[in-house]
């Protein structure tokens, strides 16, 4: 079903729900389409699958009570091989609530806190894992995006997992920080090279904070204690996202990877959205991230999704271990989100970074009582040179909506910046009304795309994705 059939204006009695409309509007069908049309040429060294996860509500009974972040997860995928775009697929993650809505039978017994993981999808030891924070196990998918089973790392994962992990390619370890509303701590989890979880390290924290992301260096696990905390009264009253901003102090914690006590540093409050990267540098730890101004309303303010009081920016914290203080710096004040680097450099110093800016997302996040941010906001990707402090923009038309860029290293290439950028662009065009997967050269970032893979339907604006190369 094409976008013109699925883009309907969903409203409750209180008015518009921007996170169920336009580029956010859920699609209603699963598609399988082969031999996709390509404008330009797909590089022949791109041999694998581009996958992207995001919330795609399967039926909305009450749009006023719906929240974007709890939509049923749907994974979209494009198979590239030999210079061709072989197929496109989109599939809901078959958690037990989704199978019930679809009239299917869930195989076996559903795990506790079962949910159609909607936040990220990653490759791990030959598996594809769809992930969610605060409770649900990851779901394993096969190469054609069919749901296989909940995955507990060979029976070794006890309790909640996370939406964001960090993979250290040198140590061959997958790290995560897990939180849960009834815990008096958060857990540092390490999946070692055998694919099994080590006993978790418990880090005491107060008020059950929401920890959406964290950072990793060669020496430290970096924990960001944001003042968004669990509200038990709101949960008892039926709140879908029972987390609130409060005035408690905000802290950064450094946990040695070799073990020991977490060292805490107080900082000015922000909403820590996503990690770009972190690394050790002498007697300092450098953390680069996307932050929103405080306060940030995870539960929203009648918009059907999270609500911000300002646009997100690319910032840096430098944690001085000798002086026992944290220095803050603004790296780029343009609105931007979804930061990515060459994933092989996670926990080590990087030079290049990439972010996305989508006008429709900022309007949805900041639209409260009909007040929207600057209508001149546009759609673009940013390539940051962190060594020189410079940046390049790749701009898209006013009717486009760009999502998170993913870096794909060129096979056999020397240098961390030699590769491709993949990301879907929702194209609001009368002739298609569908989505393009756009491939850019990282070396000619502002130039014409190498290829536009024309998908048969829309990929709604969502969250995170990965390139999964063939072995």
Image: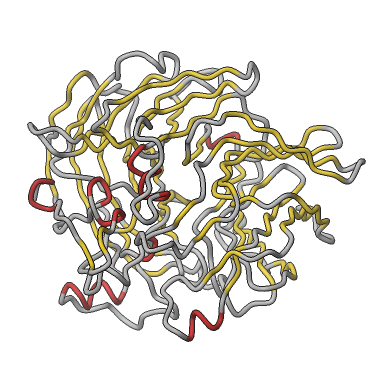
Q: Quadrant of residue 35?
A: top left
- Residue 315 image offset from top left, x and y in percent: 63, 36
Task: From this view, report whether residue 440 is shown above or below residue 457.
Answer: above
Q: In percent of the image, x 58 and y 73: which residue is there?
A: 230
**Which residue: 47% across, 36% down?**
336
Residue 352 drawn at (x, y percent)? 56, 25
Please provide percent x and percent y for residue 266: 79, 54
Q: From the viewer's perspective, tell me whether residue 136 is left or right of residue 459.
A: right
In this image, 214 relative to 203: left or right? left
Nearest the viewer among 353 and 293 is 293
Q: Which residue ends up furthest to the bottom in the rendered image?
A: 236
Residue in the picture at 69% in, 72% down: 185
How many marks overall? 0
Which of the image's four quarters has the C terminus? top left
Quarter of the image where one finds residue 194: bottom right
In the drawing, does residue 145 fall left or right of residue 340? left
Q: How is the image coloured?
A: secondary structure
Q: Nearer the viewer, residue 442 or 253?
A: 253
Residue 342, given in percent of the width and then of the height, sits at: 52, 32
The relative height of residue 95 versus residue 92 in the rendered view (above or below) is below
Question: Relative to residue 465, is residue 104 depicted above or below?
Answer: below
The extreme right residue here reads 322
In-front residue for pair 126/259:
259
């Amino acid at each position: 079903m094409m976008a013109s059939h699925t883009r309907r204006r969903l409203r409750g009695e209180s008015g518009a729900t921007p996170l169920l409309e336009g580029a956010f509007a859920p699609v209603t069908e699963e598609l399988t389409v082969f031999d996709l049309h390509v404008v330009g040429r797909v590089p022949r060294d791109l041999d694998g699958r581009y996958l992207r996860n995001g919330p795609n509500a399967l039926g909305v009974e009450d749009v006023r009570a719906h929240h974007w972040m709890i939509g049923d997860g749907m994974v979209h995928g494009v198979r590239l091989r030999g210079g061709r775009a072989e197929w496109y697929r989109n599939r809901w993650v078959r958690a037990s609530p989704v199978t019930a809505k679809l009239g299917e039978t869930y195989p076996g017994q559903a795990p506790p806190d079962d949910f159609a993981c909607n936040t990220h999808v990653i490759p791990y030891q030959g598996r594809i894992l769809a992930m969610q924070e605060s409770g649900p196990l990851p779901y394993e998918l096969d190469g054609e995006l069919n749901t296989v089973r909940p995955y507990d790392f060979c029976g070794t994962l006890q309790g909640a997992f996370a939406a964001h992990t960090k993979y250290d390619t040198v140590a061959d370890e997958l790290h995560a920080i897990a939180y849960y509303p009834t815990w008096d701590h958060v857990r540092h989890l390490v999946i070692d090279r055998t694919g099994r979880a080590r006993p978790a390290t418990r880090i005491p924290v107060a008020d059950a904070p929401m920890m959406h992301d964290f950072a990793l260096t060669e020496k430290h696990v970096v924990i960001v204690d944001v003042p968004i905390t669990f509200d038990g009264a709101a949960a008892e009253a039926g709140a879908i996202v029972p987390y609130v901003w409060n005035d408690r102090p905000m802290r950064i914690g450094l946990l040695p990877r070799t073990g020991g006590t977490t060292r805490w540093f107080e900082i000015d409050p922000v909403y820590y959205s996503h990690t770009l990267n972190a690394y050790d540098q002498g007697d300092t730890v450098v953390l680069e991230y996307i932050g929103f101004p405080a306060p940030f309303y995870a539960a929203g303010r009648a918009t059907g999704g999270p609500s911000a009081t300002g646009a997100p920016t690319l910032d840096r914290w430098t944690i001085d271990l000798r002086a026992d203080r944290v220095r803050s710096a603004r790296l780029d004040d343009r609105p931007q989100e979804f930061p990515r680097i060459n994933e092989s450099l996670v926990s080590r110093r990087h030079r290049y970074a990439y972010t996305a800016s989508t006008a429709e997302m900022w309007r949805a996040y900041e639209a409260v009582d009909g007040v929207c941010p600057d209508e001149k906001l546009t759609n673009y990707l940013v390539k940051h040179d962190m060594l020189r402090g410079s940046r390049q923009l790749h701009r898209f038309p006013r009717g486009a909506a760009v999502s998170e860029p993913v870096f794909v290293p060129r096979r056999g290439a020397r240098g961390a910046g030699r590769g491709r950028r993949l990301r879907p662009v929702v194209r609001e065009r009368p002739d298609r009304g569908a989505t393009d997967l756009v491939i850019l050269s990282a070396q000619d970032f502002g130039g014409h795309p190498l290829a536009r893979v024309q998908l048969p339907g829309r990929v709604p604006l969502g969250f995170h994705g990965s390139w999964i190369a063939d072995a």
